[in-house]
DNA sequence: CTAAAAGTTGAAGTCAACTTCAAGTCAAGG
DNA sequence: CCTTGACTTGAAGTTGACTTCAACTTTTAG
């Protein structure tokens, strides 16, 4: 597959694919003239990358968990720690979802006035601060809702 | 509470608090001399902001769902759409978590060699691409885990 | 053959979310 | 009175993840 094909299949722009290759997240298997050729497996890899990003991993982190090179260090500790992080995130996100849905349905004029919204909020908020050593920062940002 | 107190309670640095205030996400209730004074409720608000971020909202989005000003538009559609997004994210994140845990436990030398990892991957990947109109781009990241 | 379309590069630009900096204000203690 | 330390400001700097650009090479269609 050439770069345009991959872009078409995955929706990831060519510029991003080149960027990822430079960063070592994906690899092209040779060139056709000067054009990169990609193995079809790259599509799965890109899905994995997107997934890792959604989980709040940086591209560098994704690379370290993804590279099947000499891999002397898969670092299972790191992996399960990350899994724990993700689980915690999931927990909080469910609270967020509930909060959002409630806010969408709540007849109260202001969210501040609604006690059950307050309750959801508090529940969701617990563990944000004062949870573990890392103070507060956690998550990813997505755009384009 | 002065800014240092809020920072201490929430772990959010003073610089960030000022930044948030400038952005209109939080408000100080007057000044003590030239120093901001914050109502205690700001702590909850900050938790909500962090939560919104974790859910993948931009600060601007958080502000629009948070501002209890004249609010002619809470935009319930947007809220439940966001809730749907969050739910979808949760679904994929659970797959990520499973994938990570498997990768941590799997005895196979390379993830590429493990069929069950592949399966988890595919499951997680489904719906990343070709899910809805938005092609693929989802997340920016922050690190410091 | 030639011109447009598609790929290549490195470098520079953009954006969000902060952080850092220089310079200044103010209250309190010695 | 004068220094110290916590706060203020606006402006500039940083980081991660890309995107855009200018200049160039190939491939492909007419």
Image (cartoon, coloured by chain):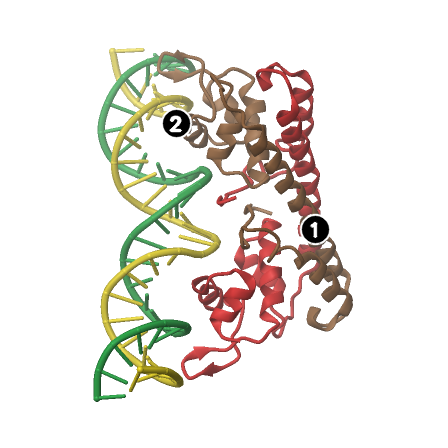
Chain colours: A brown, B red, C yellow, D green
Residue with the mark numbered 1: B83
Q: Is residue B39 left or right of residue A114?
A: left
> Residue B135: image x %, image y %?
57, 35
Q: Distance between the residues labelled 2 and 1?
A: 36 Å
Task: Report whether residue B81 is seen.
Answer: no
> Residue B71: image x %, image y %?
63, 71
Please tell me which residue lies in front, B10 or B139: B10
Q: Kindly state the secondary structure of the residue where label 2 is placed.
A: helix
Query: The disc numbered 2 marks a residue on which chain?
Result: A
> Residue D4: image x %, image y %?
30, 73
Residue with the mark numbered 2: A22
| Above or below for B56 versus D3 | above
Q: Kindly state the secondary structure of the residue where label 1 is placed.
A: helix
Please tell me which residue lies in front, A128 or A11: A128
**Circle 2: is it few (<14), some (14-19), or many (20+) Cα within 10 Å?**
few
Query: At 54% from the left edge and 42% from the top edge, which residue is drawn?
Result: B139
Query: At 75% from the left edge and 59% from the top edge, which residue is drawn?
Result: A102
Query: The disc numbered 1 marks a residue on which chain?
Result: B
| Above or below for B101 versus D20 | above
Q: In this view, does A82 lie to the left or right of C22?
A: right
């Amino acid at each position: 597959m050439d770069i345009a094909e991959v872009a078409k299949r995955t929706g990831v722009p060519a510029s991003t694919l080149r960027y990822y290759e430079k960063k070592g997240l994906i690899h092209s298997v040779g060139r056709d003239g000067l054009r990169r050729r990609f193995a079809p497996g790259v599509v799965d890899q890109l899905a994995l990358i997107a997934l890792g990003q959604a989980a709040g991993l940086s591209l560098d982190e994704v690379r370290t968990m993804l590279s099947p090179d000499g891999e002397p260090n898969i670092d299972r500790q790191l992996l399960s720690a990350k899994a724990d992080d993700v689980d915690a995130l999931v927990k909080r996100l469910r609270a967020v979802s509930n909060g959002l849905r409630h806010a969408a349905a709540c007849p109260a004029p202001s969210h501040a006035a609604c006690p059950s919204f307050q309750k959801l909020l508090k529940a969701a908020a617990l563990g944000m601060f004062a949870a573990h050593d890392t103070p507060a920062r956690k998550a990813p940002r997505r755009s384009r809702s």
